[in-house]
Image: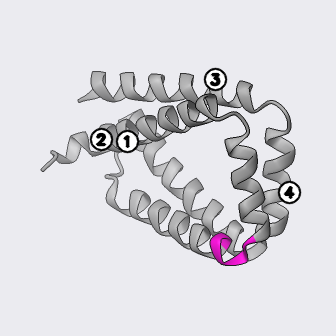
């Protein structure tokens, strides 16, 4: 089991792995993210389950992560958990509008977003390794 002081680093490590894996998925299958957004737009049940999952995961991160104002990584992880919970609530409450915004945001620049996601993933993994 992880030490309490290591929990933010472990959470950041797994978020980094997620971000890196998602970017690799988009690079291997260009248009994967756009197709996924299309699925969310067509299937309200999928939107609901996703919103519930993201809300629950964000709430878990927010409540499990120790609050230590002197540790910037702990503060960042707590904020990320809160943002995830808010994102899940927005998907549940107004998924259609949220997805319209997501489609506008991704647009035709999915390769650029995949590159950003990969860079973010590698950075978070490195921060986690250094912090552990």
Side (left or right) of 123 relative to 40: left
Observer able to see residue 33:
yes
Taking depth in this image into account, of 51 and 34 the one nearest to the observer is: 34
Residue 14's mark?
A: 1
Residue picked out by circle 3: 115
Residue 10's mark?
A: 2
Taking depth in this image into account, of 104 and 57 the one nearest to the observer is: 104
Name which residue lies at 44% across and 45% down: 77
Q: Is the magenta region chiefly helix, strand or loop?
A: helix
Taking depth in this image into account, of 109 and 12 the one nearest to the observer is: 109
Count neighbours of disc 2 (C-alpha within 10 A) and say few if under 14, some if 14 to 19, many if 20 or more.
some
Q: Are marks 1 and 2 in contact (CB under 8 Å)?
A: yes
Give whichever of discs 2 and 3 has the lower sequence position. 2
The image shows residue 32 at horizontal and vertical percentages of: 67, 43
Per the model, the C-alpha gap separating discs 3 and 1 is 18 Å
Q: Is residue 29 magenta?
A: no
Helix, strand, or loop for circle 3? helix
Tell me the magenta residue range. Answer: 43-47
The image shows residue 49 at horizontal and vertical percentages of: 57, 74
Residue picked out by circle 4: 100
């Amino acid at each position: 089991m992880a030490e309490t002081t290591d929990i933010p680093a472990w959470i950041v490590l797994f978020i980094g792995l997620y971000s890196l894996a998602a970017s690799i998925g988009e690079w291997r299958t260009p248009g994967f993210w756009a197709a996924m957004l299309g699925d969310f737009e067509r299937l309200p049940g999928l939107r609901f389950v996703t919103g519930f999952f993201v809300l629950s995961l964000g709430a878990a991160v927010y409540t499990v992560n120790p609050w230590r104002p002197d540790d910037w990584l702990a503060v960042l992880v707590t904020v990320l958990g809160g943002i995830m919970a808010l994102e899940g609530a927005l998907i549940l409450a107004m998924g259609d509008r949220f997805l319209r915004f997501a489609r506008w945001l991704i647009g035709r620049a999915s390769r650029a977003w995949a590159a950003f996601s990969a860079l973010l993933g590698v950075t978070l993994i490195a921060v986690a390794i250094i912090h552990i």
